[in-house]
Image: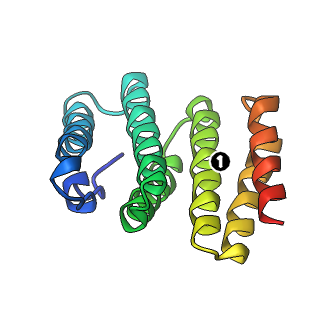
């Protein structure tokens, strides 16, 4: 089972009414993934849907961080991290490189979150993990490695 352990995003995103649209969108994405998985199993389309959900969680978390909605940002990033870990072990080898790239993105964003919170040790830990993944992932670009390197410089 690919996503049976997922908790609904509606339970994670608990911001004020201003984030109602985001709450509905994330919940709808997760419901679509679960429905697709039940009907068709593990397909390439499912992997793409999962990728889009993770990217949405990451981008929404960073917008929350910019607005100082740190609790929501942390919850979204932790949700993305859990989903990647739960699903990543079940993906085929081709999809694993995409999963690693998403994991590195999430780790870089967690690094930004912990930097924002002043937890430099945790920020450095996540940034180092992101860099390590990107360094060994053939899909990673020079821009990906530069992002992790710049994050690390900002922390140090």
Q: Look at the numbered disc 1 and give the secondary structure of its residue.
A: helix
Which sits in the foreground, 17 or 101? 17
Side of 59 relative to 99 (left or right): left
Up/down of 29 relative to 70, above or below: above
Q: Position of residue 59 (x, y in %)?
A: 46, 42
Q: Nearer the viewer, residue 64 or 126?
A: 64
Instruction: Compare residues 48 and 58 and report the one nearer the observer.
Output: 58
The image shows residue 51 at horizontal and vertical percentages of 45, 34
Give the residue furthest to the top.
45
Residue name at image x 55 percent, y 35 percent? 92
Residue 7: give x, y in percent of width and height: 25, 59
Position of 111 relative to 59 (above/below): below
Residue depicted at 21% across the width and 61% down the height: 11
Percent from the top left, x then y, of residue 144? 74, 36
Residue 136 visible here? no
- Residue occupying the far front of the picture: 67
Q: Residue at x 48, y 52 (%)?
A: 66
Locate residue 115 relative to residue 79 in the image: left or right: right
Q: Quadrant of residue 107?
A: bottom right
Left/right placement of residue 7 relative to residue 58 reads left
Inspect this view and state whether residue 68 appears: yes
The quarter of the rendered structure image containing the C terminus is bottom right
Q: Nearer the viewer, residue 74 or 135?
A: 74
According to the picture, the residue beneath numbered tag 1 turns out to be: 104
Q: Residue at x 56, y 32 (%)?
A: 95
């Amino acid at each position: 089972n690919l996503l049976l352990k997922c908790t609904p995003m509606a339970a994670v995103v608990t911001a004020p009414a201003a984030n109602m649209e985001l709450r509905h969108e994330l919940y709808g994405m997760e419901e679509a993934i679960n429905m697709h998985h039940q009907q068709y199993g593990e397909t390439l389309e499912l992997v793409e849907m999962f990728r889009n959900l993770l990217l949405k969680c990451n981008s929404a978390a960073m917008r929350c961080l910019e607005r100082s909605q740190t609790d929501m940002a942390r919850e979204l990033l932790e949700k993305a991290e859990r989903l990647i870990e739960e699903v990543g072990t079940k993906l085929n080898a081709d999809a694993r490189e995409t999963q690693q790239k998403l994991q590195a993105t999430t780790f870089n964003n967690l690094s930004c979150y912990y930097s924002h919170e002043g937890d430099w040790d945790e920020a450095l830990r996540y940034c180092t993990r992101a860099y390590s993944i990107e360094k060994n992932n053939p899909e990673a670009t020079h821009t990906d490695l530069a992002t992790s390197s710049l994050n690390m410089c900002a922390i140090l």
